[in-house]
Amino acid sequence: MNYLVAMEAAWLVRDVDDIDDAIGVAVSEAGKRLNEAEMDYVEVEVGATGCPACGEPFDSAFIAADTALVGLVLEMDVFNAESPEHAQRIAKSEIGGALRDVPLKVVEVFETEADEDEAEAEA
């Protein structure tokens, strides 16, 4: 089976004054490290956090003492996994290897459609 695995990562950015700068640096640094590991197939986006008062989503970033914690969402397609748990382990191993020392947590796993070629081969 094929799966889309979504993970969240906590990215620390030092010496920033502005939330938008922190988000840009976090996405850029994560993308750079993934590209260096030839993992350009991993999607990197800023995460969203719900407002505790109204529930409206906003960017997952917080600045204190010129240091930001940015929540990133990383998505990766995993092919030919035996189960959703197997897909999680594969994604966490692959992404975790490229983003050492970055806390990761699997947030969602979706089963995706098989390619037409794969569907014909299985039939």
Image (cartoon, rainbow, N blue to C red):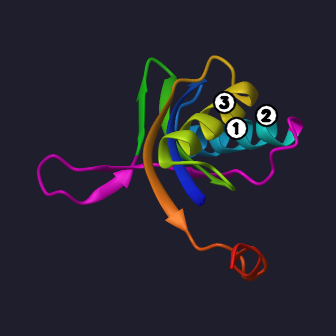
What's under tag 2, amino acid-wise? Arg
Q: Position of residue 81 (x, y in %)?
A: 63, 49
Q: Which residues are magenta?
A: 36-59
Q: Which residue is mark 1?
A: 30
Q: Which residue is mark 2?
A: 33
Residue 19 seen in the current view:
no
Crowd class of label 1 (few under 14; some 14 to 19; many from 20; radius 10 Å): many
Q: Is residue 107 covered in magenta? A: no
How many numbered markers are drawn? 3
The answer to whether 104 is drawn above or below residue 91 in the figure is: above
Q: Which residue is mark 3?
A: 93
Residue 54 relative to residue 79: left or right: left
Q: Mark 2 and mark 1 in contact (Cβ < 8 Å)?
A: yes
Residue 50 seen in the current view:
yes
Q: Earlier in the sequence, mark 2 or mark 3?
A: 2
Between circles 3 and 1, the one closer to the viewer is: 3
